[in-house]
Image (spheres, helix red, strand yellow):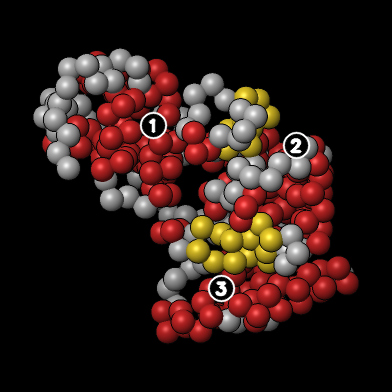
Amino acid sequence: MKTHASPSLTLAHAFEQFLAVSSFARRTCESYAEDLAPLLAECGQKPVTALTADIVQAFLVRQESLAPATFNRRLAALRSFTRWLRAQGWEASALLDGIERKPEGKRTARALDSQQVESILRKIEDPRDRALFWLIYDGGLRCQEALAIDIDDVSWSERSILIHGKGDRPREMFFSRAVGIFLDKYLAMRGYPTSGPLFVTHRKARLPRRADLTSDGYARLSYRQADTLWKGYTPDWDLHQLRHTAISVRAAHDYTEADLKRFSGHTSLRSLERYIADNREAAKRKAREWERRQRAQ
């Protein structure tokens, strides 16, 4: 659908239209919204024509302190949005002239020592943070997968969660009794809500998206907020290392390629795809075996 340029359209509404008419996966839309949130907070209520090269440059300058991968992701989101604006008839062709991606270099090994990780996790006292980071580690989840969980996705009797994975591919995660206790204590602090986002902010949101809002006005925790929280506990560790460590430890202890694919949600082992997707009981059995092994240590 063609959206024609309108002088009265605000930048925030234009961005909403951009996400609505584009064929992005849900997680891509969430990532774009998060990456451009600082820009929209600054000038989202202004008309689209207020988005000048100076404003774009100032926004990118403020991102200079971020890791190259994060800077490049935000630049890509902005480039995609301005390309769409140009296609709708706005003059946006020169906004990113001369702006280049940052070189990211070679990635270092991401797995951490599991005992060090668990030592850090045991020191976390905040009920929400403790439940979130233990859940990511216990399930080898991507942080955004954990943050996307709704309370309705959790089966307490099965101790399982429906995970909305990368590319909107669902899978089931089986969590340990310890993580179940952490989740229960966190939800008790919130008064045991029965619907809405599982992990939310401690303060009520000012301009949340309706789909990410609880009935009492709290917003779903964002990746940026979770990353900031994690850096408060471990300044030198990347949040994704929780997931990478969880997968690496299991790879060293009897998990087969099929088990790892089911556990992690990776899709590269194509020959095993149907077997893994259908073998729910094997995945559950492996999760429980792993839990018993950890308790016995």
Dots 2, 3 in contact, CB < 8 A: no
Picture layout, residue 7 above or below residue 130:
above
Amino acid at the residue labelled 2: Arg
Residue, x 22% and y 33% (percent of image)?
Answer: 82
CA–CA distance between discs 2 and 3?
Answer: 32 Å
Q: Quadrant of the N terminus?
A: top left
Picture layout, residue 112 above or below residue 222:
below
Amino acid at the residue labelled 3: Arg
Residue 132 spot, x, y in % from top left: 68, 47
Residue, x 81% and y 62% (percent of image)?
Answer: 177
Residue 286 spot, x, y in % from top left: 70, 77
Left or right placement of residue 2 versus residue 290 in this view: left
Name which of mark 2 and mark 1 comes first in the sequence. 1
Provide the residue designation for mark 3.
262
Q: Nearer the viewer, residue 61 or 122?
A: 122
Name which of mark 2 and mark 3 comes first in the sequence. 2
Picture layout, residue 268 above or below residue 165:
below
Left or right placement of residue 202 versus residue 32 in this view: right
Provide the residue designation for mark 2.
190
CA–CA distance between discs 2 and 1?
Answer: 30 Å
Q: Quadrant of the C terminus?
A: bottom right
Q: Number of marks in the image?
A: 3
Q: Nearer the viewer, mark 2 or mark 1?
A: 2
Provide the residue designation for mark 1.
36
